[in-house]
Image (cartoon, rainbow, N blue to C red):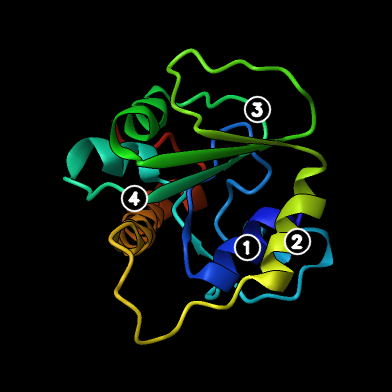
Amino acid sequence: GRGPAALAARLGWPLLADINSGLRKPGAAGESEGATMSAAAVRSVPLYDLLLGAEEVAPPDVVLMAGGRLVSKRLQAFVASRSRACILVEPHGQRHDPSHSVSHRVEGSIDAVLMALAAVLPPRAPEATPQPLLALASASAALDAALDQALAPAVREGAEPPP
């Protein structure tokens, strides 16, 4: 849905979509279901799992999780050990939170809740203090470009990628 991408773009927050999310593919967050926001407005971090293990990342003040539990163990650990507040928006009342990291729980339609928040919260001011996690978005884009460049010859030739 459009809710996570709309709210992330509005607040200037990075979007770390778990493997089960439909927002995982670069650019998908800004293009899903007729969304009108540009891919540049949504700072997607599709390769966060690699980067969280390789870089020291400052803890976020707030983590907003949309949907069910996380699959990525690295992201689970990051959320559980680093965030000050963790808000979970989910469409059901199941309370599956083995790490006990969720501090606030909102039950309802994910898109409806997040689109409503995006409509009422003020946009992030351009001069605001930079979000430390946004550096992951740039690193993810650079890593993705390097992987595409390294694998392009093998893909063109139909050969197996190098080990």
Residues at marks 3 and 2, CA–CA distance in whole angstroms: 18 Å
Residue lying farthest to the bottom in this orientation: 127
Residue carrying label 2: 115
Residue carrying label 3: 68
Q: What element carries label 3?
A: loop
Q: What residue type is labelled 3?
A: Gly
Q: What residue type is labelled 4?
A: Pro
Q: Position of residue 20 (x, y in %)?
A: 63, 31
Who comes first in sequence, dot 4 or dot 2? 4
Residue carrying label 4: 60
Who comes first in sequence, dot 4 or dot 3? 4
* Category of crowding for the residue at label 2, using alpha-carbon neighbours closer than 10 angstroms: few (below 14), some (14–19), many (at least 20): some
Residue at 65% x, 17% y: name it: 95
Q: Position of residue 93 (x, y in %)?
A: 76, 22
Residues at badges 1 and 2 in contact (C-beta under 8 Å)? yes
Tag of residue 7: 1
Residue at 28% x, 44% y: name it: 51
Frontmost of labels 4 and 3 is 4
Residues at marks 1 and 2, CA–CA distance in whole angstroms: 7 Å
Who comes first in sequence, dot 1 or dot 2? 1
Who comes first in sequence, dot 4 or dot 1? 1
Q: Is mark 4 on a helix, strand or loop?
A: loop
Who comes first in sequence, dot 3 or dot 1? 1
Q: What residue type is labelled 2?
A: Met
Residue toward you, 32 or 134:
134
Who comes first in sequence, dot 3 or dot 2? 3
